[in-house]
Amino acid sequence: MYEFLLKKTDIEIRFLEFMKNKFLILLLITYFTVANLCGQGIYRDVPRLDSLIYRLNELSKVNEKNETVQHYAAMFYINAVLHGYKSNEALHYLRLCESKIDSFGYGVGYDWDAFQDGSINSKTTNYSVTITEHMLPLIYGYKNAVVSRNRIYHLVNSFKKIPLADTLDHGICIAYSDNLNDAVGCVHNTNISCANFIEKLRPIYFLDSNLLIIQKKIIEREIYSYNEKDTSYLYWDRDTGICDQNHLANSALQMYNLPNDELKKIAVMLYKKILSKPDKNMSALIGQCALLLIDDAHYEYIYKVLSDLIEKKSDYKDYYSYKFESSQISSNMNYFLCLLREKWISESRY
């Protein structure tokens, strides 16, 4: 009888040892899974990011009277992220954005010699990068039932009126604006932005076969134009030097968002080059914020830079018209932080 009890105890001990080992293995698997997800930006301190977004949003409201359509579109999206698409805060900026469009189109709101060649674009000139990149919040608003379908039709039709920038081989390039004065060679971040804009139209059913052909030919041009030796692009085909970090980062982000493996490879190489030696000025910082959407490994660096700028103790400097105190510049940076926030939340659901 007692021997039977001892045997039973021995079995129980072995069973407990077995379960203990299983538990340790499970614990290790859980640890490395969480660590991996953290590395992908899935487990992140969203409330901490919200605090920075909120502080930048308050800063961007200062001196914003008669601001640009680009600023109002960014502020609409920022406040939609903070307060909801149907909030008074978001709708206030949406109304300002739409009013600006109805008055001046998709431009800067003043006469401008874009290429410094003596040709003046009127204040109602439509710029391709404004339509294809800065107005993306209108598409987000359409998806959330606060922007009308007619507004998106107007956006797409305005894009279709922009001419080609040149007649070169190897794909096509969309001109800098709808003014023929600006059909003077390819501006590469603008061109790839047009391809990404077409991709954004896919889930909302605004695509047509001609737009898909345009997208394919833009991608062909940008792959061909890549400067492998310098890991860069020309900003404009008539430039002699390589592109600045802001516009190069913008190109990288647009490429990364497109369903093309070759473009993604180029985007990652541009990302690595820029962040290997980031320029410390406001123009470059916008690009560095945009790169968070490719890989957020430098998030803590950006968080500190922006926090220091708010507290007026950063070593990042203003760069010509790129001044941190400008509402349009701070809202541009904050726009990318809000996109990052939405990306984090989206990834955490899977």
Image (cartoon, helix red, strand yellow):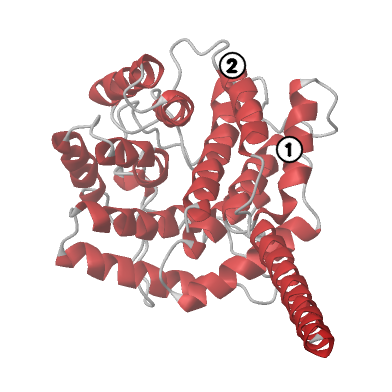
Q: Amino acid at mark 2?
A: Glu
Residue 6 image-quadrant placement: bottom right
Q: Nearer the viewer, residue 201 or 88?
A: 88
Residue 46 appears in the rendering = yes
Q: Is 167 displayed left or right of 16 in the figure?
A: left
Residue 35 image-quadrant placement: bottom right
Q: Nearer the viewer, residue 280 or 47?
A: 47
Q: Nearer the viewer, residue 303 or 172?
A: 303
- Which residue in the protein does label 1 denote? 303
Q: Amino acid at mark 1?
A: Tyr
Secondary structure of residue under mark 2: helix
Could you tell me how far apart the alpha carbons at marks 2 and 1 are, in whole angstroms? 16 Å
Residue 126 appears in the rendering = no
Secondary structure of residue under mark 1: helix
Where in the figure is residue 78, as x and y percent of width and height? 48, 29
Total marks shown come to 2
- Which residue in the protein does label 2 denote? 58
Residue that lies at the very extreme toward the front in this rendered image: 1
Q: Is 277 displayed left or right of 46 in the figure?
A: right
Residue at x 33% of width, y 28% of height: 122
Q: Is 267 displayed left or right of 221 in the figure?
A: right
Where in the figure is residue 127, as x and y percent of width and height? 36, 40
Where in the figure is residue 186, as x and y percent of width and height? 44, 59
